[in-house]
Image (cartoon, rainbow, N blue to C red):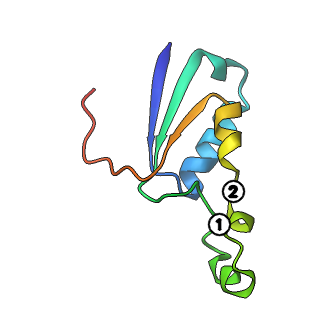
Amino acid sequence: MQSIIVVGNVMVGYKFCEKFAAQSRSKDFKIIVFREETRPAYDRVHLSEFFENQDAKALELAPSEWYSENNIDLIVDERVADIDR
């Protein structure tokens, strides 16, 4: 099985995972996503709404479970400095 490494889990990284997981051949690959922050990707455009309701989960683009359900390893709180292919 081939691996795809995604560095960064902001809007673009999440959208890549979402679209890739929807492909029929996605099961042939293992996706590993690294994120420096401690939570999954969230909607930064609506970040100011957090201060209204204090609900960080409401800003998530997908819950952590979504990643595992789609055979994606989400590794949070991990900074990537380089990749040794």
- In the displayed structure image, the side of residue 80 where residue 26 appears, left or right: right
Q: Quadrant of residue 43?
A: bottom right
- In the displayed structure image, the side of residue 77 where residue 59 appears, left or right: right
Q: Which residue is mark 1?
A: 43
Q: Residue at x 71, y 27 (%)?
A: 23
Marks counted in the figure total 2
- In the displayed structure image, the side of residue 21 where residue 11 appears, left or right: left
Q: Secondary structure at mark 2?
A: loop
Q: Residue at x 68, y 31 (%)?
A: 70
Q: Quadrant of residue 17?
A: top right
Q: Is residue 53 above or below residue 40?
A: below
Query: Residue 64 location, x and y as percent?
Result: 65, 46
Q: Residues within 10 Å of mark 1 (few under 14, many from 20)?
A: some
Question: Which residue type carries mark 1?
Answer: Asp
Q: Is residue 30 above or below residue 11?
A: above
Q: Which residue is mark 2?
A: 61
Q: Secondary structure at mark 1?
A: loop
Q: Quadrant of residue 54?
A: bottom right
Question: Which residue type carries mark 2?
Answer: Leu
Query: Residue 41 location, x and y as percent?
Result: 59, 56
Closer to the chain start, of discs 1 and 2, is 1
Which quadrant: the C terminus?
top left
Q: Which mark is residue 65?
A: none
